[in-house]
Every structure is written in C-alpha cells, then in structure tokens.
C-alpha cells in the first residue's frame, strides 16, 4: 500500500480498536498521573490473557509479550521486533510490507500496566511494571534450573526436588548420603581420550544436593582432567559451603579447596573458568600407579558448611 492519507487512516482506525477493549481508563493524559492496571497470569505459555489488553500485547508470531519497539503494518497488525526480522519485514497476518511503523499507542498502554512474574506458580508473588518485568524474570530466584547432567544435552528444567528425582530416575546417577567421598575414575587407553565425561555423582549433604563432576578435555594444547563441585541452588547459598578435592600416591598429594559453583553456571562455564582440581594427564597417570597406561585415579574430598 502506497503511503498517504489512506494508510494513515487505516493506522488511525487500528488505534481505535483499543477503545473496544475498555482502554479509555488507561490513557495517559498530558500532565496527569498514569493509571496502573494489574493483570494476572494463566497457563498459556505462562502468559495467558485475562482481558483484551493482554492479548493485544502478545506477539502473534512467538506469543511472547512485546516490548518497544512494537511494530505494526499499515493495517494495524502488530508484532515484536525479533519477529519482524524473522518474517522478513512482511506482515504475517495480511502480507503487507511492514516498513518502520511504531505502534506508539500500544507501547504507551504497556507502560501503564503491572504484571506478576511469569514464575508466579513456582513461588514468586511480586508484581512489576510492564517494562521491568522481563529484566526481573531473567534473574528471578524462582526461575527453573537447567538439569545439571553433563553426559548428554538434557533440556529438562524444573525446581530442585524435581531435578533430583529426574537425575535419579532418568539419568540413573549415583546418589550418596554424606559429606565425604572417595571415588575412583578408570579409563583404558587414556592417551586416546581428549574429551570425556564420567557419570555424575550427587551427594545429599546438610540437607542440600551437590554434583561431583569429572571430565577430560584439552586445556590449550595440554590434555587434562578436572574435578569440580556444583551446588543445586543459588550462588548466594553455594557460598555458605566449601569443599576440598585430593589425589595422592607415592607420598605426594595434589589438593584443591574452593567454593562449589551454583548449577546456574553451566558445567562448561565452570570448566572454562578452571574453577576446580585440574590434573595434567601425565600427573594423573602418575597418581594412577602401575605402568601408567591406564587411568585409575582416586579422588577424595569433603564438603563443609562455613560458620
């Protein structure tokens, strides 16, 4: 559609649709105090609508809530900025070219709203201005955790009790009660292994769960093994604990002491930060004893709570 009076008329008419949803009370007049309207959550994508306002703010392509810049076609159909790129600047509703028309009226309506956190059903009962909600949700303490299992790319997310049951029932990980451990890691032909992950071990200690990881990878050009601990909870809680890891043989010891990392940090991030016991391959084989042709590394350690 060519630009001109007809296009402007259609855009104006699309703005008038808002009146059909009883939005007159949300209009922000110059020199007046904005009216805040609170909208609740349902089940559809965690963001179901309780009224027409919420439906208008939902992108028709990705179904997520829209944030500025909110775009619209000449016929008034809206969508978010991410989806504008995905649909190659073509309106998914009427197929007209989108151009660069901002839906300022809808952005102003959004500014007047307050919404609950999307993780309300997981325990977060705070209410946020519309434009602050997304930032909060990215760091909400009630947001689900990713499964800490590293043997495969597991996509399960949930709360801690559910993840513990998932690790036990679905991944068949070793579960132990106690705050000390003594594990032996074995691998034949270790010289042929550059990247490997051993079975995760979970410890129930002080009423919380800790994940013991053991992996082989290349650190630069050097093949190494690394053991480290992750805490199933938030970083602030993890800092209340400390742990040691130790390998020893022939009157020699290699000891690491640190603070467990939260499972909010992926195992890859922990590995890349080298936050754990790192053992060069030749030293690991020395601690393994024998002819040093097979990895038989015993890792001991303990967890304690800081006072």
Image (spheres, helix red, strand yellow):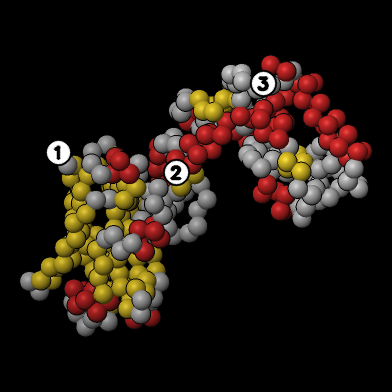
Residue annotated with mark 1? 307
Q: Residue 264: x percent and y percent?
A: 40, 47
Q: Which mark is residue 255?
A: none
Q: Residue 190: x percent and y percent?
A: 33, 77
Q: Above or below — where is 229 with respect to 191?
A: above
The reply, left or right, for residue 6 in relation to residue 262 is: right
Nearer to me, 186 or 237: 237
Residue annotated with mark 3? 29
> In which image quadrant can residue 63 be found?
top right
Question: Could you tell me if residue 294 is visible in this image?
Answer: yes
Nearer to me, 111 or 198: 111
| Residue at 24 percent of width and 60 percent of height | 183
User: Tag 2: Cα neighbours inside 10 Å, few (<14), some, or many (≥20)?
Assistant: many
Q: Quadrant of the C terminus?
A: top left
The reply, left or right, for residue 10 in relation to residue 197 is: right
Q: Residue 302: x percent and y percent?
A: 18, 51
Q: Residue 242: x percent and y percent?
A: 20, 48
User: Tag 3: Cα neighbours inside 10 Å, few (<14), some, or many (≥20)?
Assistant: few
Which of the marked residues, 2 or 1, is nearer the chain's N terminus?
2
Marks 2/3: CA–CA distance: 43 Å
Residue annotated with mark 2? 145
Q: Above or below — where is 279 with respect to 136?
A: below
């Amino acid at each position: 559609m060519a630009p001109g009076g007809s296009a402007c008329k259609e855009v104006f008419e699309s703005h008038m649709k808002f009146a059909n949803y009883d939005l007159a009370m949300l209009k922000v007049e110059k020199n007046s105090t904005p009216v805040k309207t609170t909208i609740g959550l349902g089940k559809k994508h965690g963001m179901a609508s309780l009224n027409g306002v919420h439906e208008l703010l939902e992108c028709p392509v990705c179904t997520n809530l829209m944030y500025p810049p909110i775009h619209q076609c000449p016929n008034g159909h809206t969508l978010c900025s991410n989806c504008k790129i995905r649909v190659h600047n073509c309106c998914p509703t009427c197929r007209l070219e989108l151009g660069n028309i901002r839906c300022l009226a809808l952005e102003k309506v959004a500014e007047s709203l307050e919404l609950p956190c999307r993780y309300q059903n997981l325990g977060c009962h705070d209410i946020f201005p519309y434009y602050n909600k997304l930032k909060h949700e990215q760091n909400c303490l009630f947001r689900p955790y990713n499964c800490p299992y590293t043997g495969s790319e597991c996509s399960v997310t949930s709360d801690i009790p559910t993840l513990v049951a998932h690790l036990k029932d679905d991944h068949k990980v070793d579960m132990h009660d106690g705050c000390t451990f003594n594990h032996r890691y074995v691998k034949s032909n270790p010289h042929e292994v550059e990247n490997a992950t051993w079975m995760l071990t979970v410890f129930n200690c002080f009423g919380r769960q800790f994940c013991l990881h053991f992996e082989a990878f290349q650190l630069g050009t050097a093949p190494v093994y690394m053991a480290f601990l992750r805490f199933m909870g938030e970083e602030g809680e993890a800092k209340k604990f400390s742990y040691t890891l130790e390998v020893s043989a022939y009157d020699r010891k290699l000891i690491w002491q640190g603070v467990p990392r939260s499972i909010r940090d992926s195992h890859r991030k922990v590995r890349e930060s080298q936050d754990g016991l790192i053992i060069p391959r030749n030293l690991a084989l020395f601690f393994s004893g024998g002819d040093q042709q097979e990895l038989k590394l015993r890792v001991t350690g303990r967890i304690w709570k800081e006072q």
